[in-house]
Image (cartoon, coloured by chain):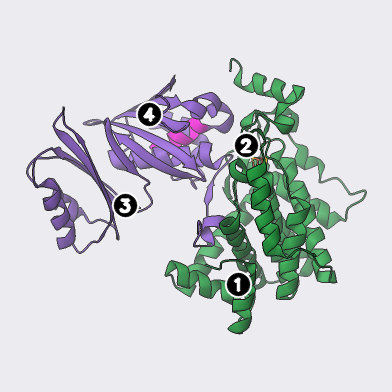
Amino acid sequence: MKYDSIFDVVGHIMVGPSSSHTAGACRIGYIANILLGEIPVKARISLHGSFAETYRGHKTDIALIGGLLGFPPEDERIPDSFNIADKKGMQYSFTEIDLGSDYHPNSVLLELESKNEKLSIIGCSIGGGNIVIKEINGLEAGFDGDSPTIIEIHKDVRGMVANITSAIAMHGLQIIEMHLSRNIRKGIALSWIECSAPISDELIETIRDIPEMINVRCLNV
Amino acid sequence: MYKNLKHFLNDSKENKLSLHEAVIKEECLSTDKTRDFVLKRAKKSLDAMLNSLEKGNTLDINLPIKEVIEQSQLMMKSPTFLSKDLKEAVYWAMSIVEYSNGMGIICAAPTAGSSGVFPAVLFKAQQMLDKTEEDVMNAFLVGSMVGAIIGNNATLSGSEGGCQAEVGVASAMAASTITYLAGGTPSQVEQSVALSLKNLLGLICDPVAGLVISPCIKRNAIGVMNAFLAAEMALSGVTSIIPADEVIEAMMKVGLALPSNLKETGTGGIADTPTGRRIKKEIFGKK
Ligand code: SF4
């Protein structure tokens, strides 16, 4: 069964005109905003495939900026995103890019800077407003942002996953899905962990304190 | 979640529940939510639909295809053939999709491109029959379940099944909703699904320049008229020889058989006409 709720059919409240090219794009930006923790000071946005070809007609660009400003796809302020970004002092630029055939035709590379941090994300809009965050800082990801998710990057040493999962268990959460990808050359690894309930600040702190941890981010949806 | 319409109707009969009560029960069971949650969530969607209908009437929208600007407005003129109500329902549906194109917030039903049909038909029928908000909520639940059942047995995406899966399904959802709103029996509700879906079977998805504008906006108009027609027929006792569940299966097969240039790629049908190609070139230039 594809749909186990009537609200899969009549529950998607979102900005038009296209669920994949507008609402999905907004959602990628929105999740990037949450992962960065703030509105980026600078955003370099590279559009791939069908996003590159049709973004003007579908207003993909406005939707992405709206998302980066922290607007979810049902936010009425989205059409005014360019003006709001200017007022908030966010600099942005759009270019086209060919990421190659491994990437969904509706993909975008976001290179973001806040005052202290840099973050690069590749997101794909896979239809019906659903998305996948495919890469973070060049490491493979693959979560959809529909459940509370912990995303962390650590040094690729023994025992890290055990430490992380036991921290999660200690905080009374259940893991729904988990994924680990390693970059052996750089000696780092990224994992994302979908949890059964919202993730507390304390849990994030506990994970951050694990030795050899590089970066922890959290998506509470 | 109900396997098909038969299952839905039988379950309501066996448990002596009205159709909308059966929907609430089933939704709670399959999503592990409370009745209160389901009703609140439904209200949220209904509110978003109503909001898009009200705003769609007022907003100044600048569409990338200049040929379609203010087409919905023309439907406000006094009617020649249709009743004033039906003409206004068509106007509502078109203006919701125009609003969506102006980056308005809409509730997909089942998709953004077909989002005008269901709210326009439901709220117009409420007005015509002088029904309460509670009646509208109940009817909404029944139509939504019809949409989910069609989605599970066929598809709700133009890229998989053509426009029969979008405007076609929206029209079937709308038909069943107002058949129920008007006090139709469960069997009449089922007939309205079969009758409406059959009329739009084989409808292709051929958006000019790949944008959800043409034919989409005006295609919502046939979705509306077809819904009123099928509901009227079902309420009069007209029946479909082919049961609704079989029509739904047929729709999936037709969808699979459609070549990909007629499924949302914007490369067939009216998209692939001299004018369609010219518009695409004007919008996307070099490409
Ligand atoms: S023509 Fe295609 S894009 Fe337009 S409403 Fe129909 S299915 Fe959707």
Q: Is residue A64 magenta?
A: yes
Mark 1: few/some/many CA within 10 Å (<14, 14-19, 20+): few
Chain letter, colour purple: A
Q: Of helix, strand and loop, which mostly describes the magenta segment?
A: helix
Segment colored magenta: A60-68
Q: State yes or no: discs 2 and 4 in contact (Cβ < 8 Å).
A: no
Corner quadrant of residue B84: bottom right
Which residue position holds label 1? B7
Circle 3 or circle 4, nearest the eye: 4
Read off the residue under disc 3: A220
Mark 4 Cα within 10 Å, few/some/many (few <14, many 20+)? Answer: many
Within 8 Å of ligand 1, the CB of disc 3?
A: no
State which chain disc 4 sits on.
A
The chain letter corresponding to green is B
Specify few, some or many for label 2: CA neighbours under 10 Å numbering under 14, 14-19, or 20 or more: many
Chain letter belonging to callout 1 = B
Q: Which residue is under mark 4?
A: A109
Q: Is residue B280 above or below residue A207?
A: above
